[in-house]
Image (spheres, grey):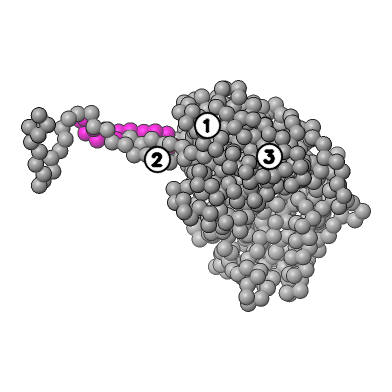
Amino acid sequence: MPATTAEKHPSLAREPANLIGGKWIPIPGETIASRNPARPDRVVWRGDSSPQAAHEAIAAARDALPAWSSMSFDRRAEALRSFQKLAKDRADAFAEILCDETGKALWECKAEAGLLSAKVDITLETGEFSGRHRVTDFSFPMGETKRAACYFRPHGVMACLGPFNFPGHLPNGHIVPALAMGNTVVFKPSDKTPGVGQFLAELYAEALDSVGAPPGVVNLVQGGVDVASAVIASPDIDGVLFTGSWPVGRKILEASLDYPGRMVALELGGNNPAVVLPDADLRQAAIEIVRCAFITTGQRCTCTRRLIVHEAVADRLIPAIVEAASRLVVGDPRSAEPVFMGPIINEASQQAVFRFERRLAEAGGRVLLGSRPLEGREGWYVTPSIVEVDRFVNRPGDDPEGFHPGCDEEIFGPLLRIARVSDLDGAIDQANRTRYGLAASIFTRDEQAQRRFLAECRAGCVNVNTGTAGASSKLPFGGLGNSGNHRPAGAFSLDYCAFPTANMTELGADAQIAQGMTFDDAWLA
């Protein structure tokens, strides 16, 4: 598709550039480019990509580490408060470029803009249940002249690899706690949303300059797979903070095998189930399931992908869900009229949804609501899809036994599959028929059923009578299996941004002579 000439987006302070060692380095070129999903002929950001820039950014972050980590926590917090103020002041500008680059509805973009500044409060707050409480130095006496202490130290240079679906909020959720604990950062945004990545880096550069931070505390390198590979292959990276897909997460783990001391925090995808039992509030369940299956055009890792409904209420609930999904307003993300969801990120993602739905139908799935583009509308639009299957199976779509309509595949788009069960045992079994383990929900008034689901469902975020999509920033956020490696973000992000160091200090001179040991003070004469 021919592209119009890319001009600097009005939300950005400068032309496309990398930020290395405190200097903005223009990168004119066409190696990577982002298009407006609602108007694909419009290029939002276009620039060059170079793996060499990754090495330079890592070196700059290494140079800045001693001075930054030796600053007091309060001084680093001052820089984060400066960032917070800038993020609040420029929230509208952030929402504008986010909307243009992702195609998300403008109301969603404004909500994400507010999350940038909120992360600072969550990170810096104190109290028994705060993240800072768990990473605060402590000490205690071991005897009359001996003390024990625990100190929390930064890992060093942290690589932050951002996703496209929440290109501001999710990398920011890594960067804020990393900086708070004294780490320096090399940030590589998704090559689908480089403009939002640059906007975020511009805020950090200004905030850090305002407190006299050394150059290189936060560095920005744009690029695709080649740049990401150069970053994670570097022996000078002390941590990788990643949000994205399991296949990429696997490559990060492989690249880190020779660096056992490297902190790797993976926030990956999900094939998230929602269970509905006969005693559930069906209105509540229907609304939450439709919202969580299709919000952000199905491009949230916590979106409901699988509905497991008890056969006693299936004939009432399923038609209501289909009807509600068919009435969702899909349209221009900047429309003056209420729009639930805009286009999907690009044409490849749009076609992936259509292709997966066709495969499900060919394999025996019953299409209850077919997905389609919007007639007469440019842009990568895709309407909701709902397919009923006989059961879910814990095997991938490319399994050697053949494609199964209930296969364990995460399709990052607005497609919901439904299966019926006869009891709670079957529901829990079906919910766990996945290699993933990010989010899950159950809808029931039965407290015993709730307790069983909380105890037996294998997921990091398990909800009751509310949907899978959405989280509290005061709780951990992460999963297990192919969804993560037990390094939850959210309120627990500070935990993976520092490591504890044990210390014992003897203040006296009463060294203990062990059994079988002899020492004569005359030897020191």
Residue 41 location, x and y as percent?
86, 47
Q: Which residue is mark 1?
A: 64
Residue picked out by circle 2: 500
The quarter of the displayed image where residue 84 is located = top right
As measured in the structure, the alpha-carbon distance from the residue carrying label 1 to the one carrying label 3 is: 21 Å
Give the crowd class for mark 3: few <14, some 14-19, many >=20 residues within 10 Å: many
Residue 148: image tag = none
The answer to whether the residues at label 1 and label 3 have Cβ atoms under 8 Å apart is no
Q: Residue at x 81, y 63 (%)?
A: 370
Of the pair 218 and 304, the residue shown nearer to us:
218
Query: Which quadrant holds the C terminus?
Result: top left
* SS at badge 1: helix
Element on which disc 2 rests? strand
Q: Residue furthest bottom?
A: 401
**In this image, 336 relative to 486: left or right?**
right
Q: Alpha-carbon distance for marks 2 and 3?
A: 31 Å
* Residue situated furthest right in the rendering: 376
Q: Count of labels shown?
A: 3
Highlighted magenta segment, given as a residue range: 135-148
User: Image height check: is 413 above or below 187?
Assistant: below
Residue appearing at x 39%, y 33% in the figure: 137
Between disc 1 and disc 2, whose residue precedes? Answer: 1
Q: Position of residue 472 (x, y in %)?
A: 59, 42
What residue is shown with label 3?
197
Nearest the eye: 314 or 427: 427
| Residue type (three-letter) at the residue carrying disc 3 | Gly
